[in-house]
Image: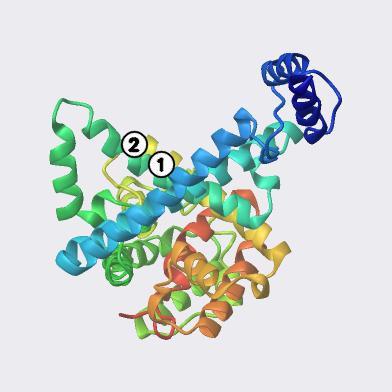
Amino acid sequence: MALSRVCWARAALWGSAVPPGLYVVRRLQFVRSGLTWGAPRSSKLHLSPKADVKSLISYVVTKTKVINGKYHRFLGRHFPRFYVLYTIFMKGLQMLWADAKKARRIKTNMWKHNIKFHQLPYREMEHLRQFRRDVTKCLFLGILSIPPFANYLVFLLMYLFPRQLLIQHFWTPKQQIDFLDIYHALRKQSHPAILCYLEKVVPLISDAGLQWHMTELCTKMQRGIHPAVHDILALRECFSNHPLGMDQLRALQMKALSRAMLLTPYLPSVLLRHRLKTHTTVIHQLDKALAKLGVGQLTAQEVKSACYLRGLNSTHIAEERCRTWLGEWLQISCSLKETELSLLLHNVVLLSINYVGSRR
């Protein structure tokens, strides 16, 4: 009797009038089913596998940036000269990669919409033109690196001859100015030969009026006078057929013109003529696109690059003078027909040789 009272008292303390044995069984059942009478578990959510991968990638990227920053600071403190070269090289790779992606996007758009090169806007045309030249230079380095262990020699050559082997992305700011001056000095060496050839062909011009205009133009060139636009356009007929037409140029004159256009002169006459035609045609197409855009829409760097491509050493000339000169060039170029492109080719010398600030 006393035992039963104790059992009922325990049951009352638990809040249930169940016998002790039944309570133990239910307790075990609740434990097995994953439920407990203790404090509730935390409601912490578990991420999905994709979220786990993203967080891991984010962590790795963050740590990589930290380590990369420490590595850059180490190089800057202990190897400052090497750090400058390393920084320029890495930035050059990034710019080259960005150029490649942009060129691919332009080519894809051309393919989708059946657009020709000469139908592109000016900036896209100029980007493709420059990217092709850069890729050609990079391919040459790639070919040199093919033999086993030749890549070590290529790195040494790149360090010793950056002007000849590297594109502008990998030049220092000082090298960009110095190398452009060197290239302009090389093309200036061809100017006397081109002017001398123009003087020699004066007797071969059938029209007396054109003979007089050519003689006057050569005289102005020798006196250091910058010719006016109408002085050059007055001779357009001489450059459309014999003796100064593109198909009538002699080998020595084509070699001199190739040097003036920064093209290699060490090719057979047939290839020289083809390259000069192609290069001049591209510039003529660029000029038409630039005339539509307007010189005023170009940045200072774009103006200087456009002038340098057309024969003017714009690195030491004020921006406004470059814009004025480029406007004169476009006035001549947009007035010419395809049969008169030899005049545009010679205009690289005629319009730039005596321009103020270009005789450096």
Q: Nearer the viewer, residue 267 or 193?
A: 267
> Position of 223 compared to 339: left or right?
left
Q: Residue at x 50, y 48 (%)?
A: 99
Q: Quadrant of the C terminus?
A: bottom left
Decide: few, some or many residues near mark 2? Use Cα within 10 Å; few <14, some 14-19, many ≥20: few
Q: Residue at x 42, y 46 (%)?
A: 133
Residue bearing mark 2: 139
The residue lying furthest to the front in this view is 1
Residue bearing mark 1: 135
Going by the numbered disc 1, the residue's amino acid type is Val
Q: Where residue 229 sits in the image (x, y, percent)?
A: 59, 76
Q: Where residue 15 sits in the image (x, y, percent)?
A: 83, 33
Question: Taking 101 as reference, is 319 above or below it?
Answer: below
The answer to whether residue 248 of the structure is visible from this angle is: no
Q: Quadrant of the N terminus?
A: top right
- Report how many numbered discs are placed on residues in the image: 2
Q: Nearer the viewer, residue 158 or 113?
A: 158
Q: Residue at x 62, y 41 (%)?
A: 105
> Position of 145 compared to 12: left or right?
left
The answer to whether residue 114 of the structure is visible from this angle is: yes
Question: Taking 198 as reference, is 225 above or below it?
Answer: below
Residue 41 sits in quarter? top right
Decide: few, some or many residues near mark 1? Use Cα within 10 Å; few <14, some 14-19, many ≥20: some
Disc 1 element:
helix
Residue 10: image tag: none
Residue 29 sits in quarter? top right
Q: Are marks 2 and 1 in contact (CB under 8 Å)?
A: yes
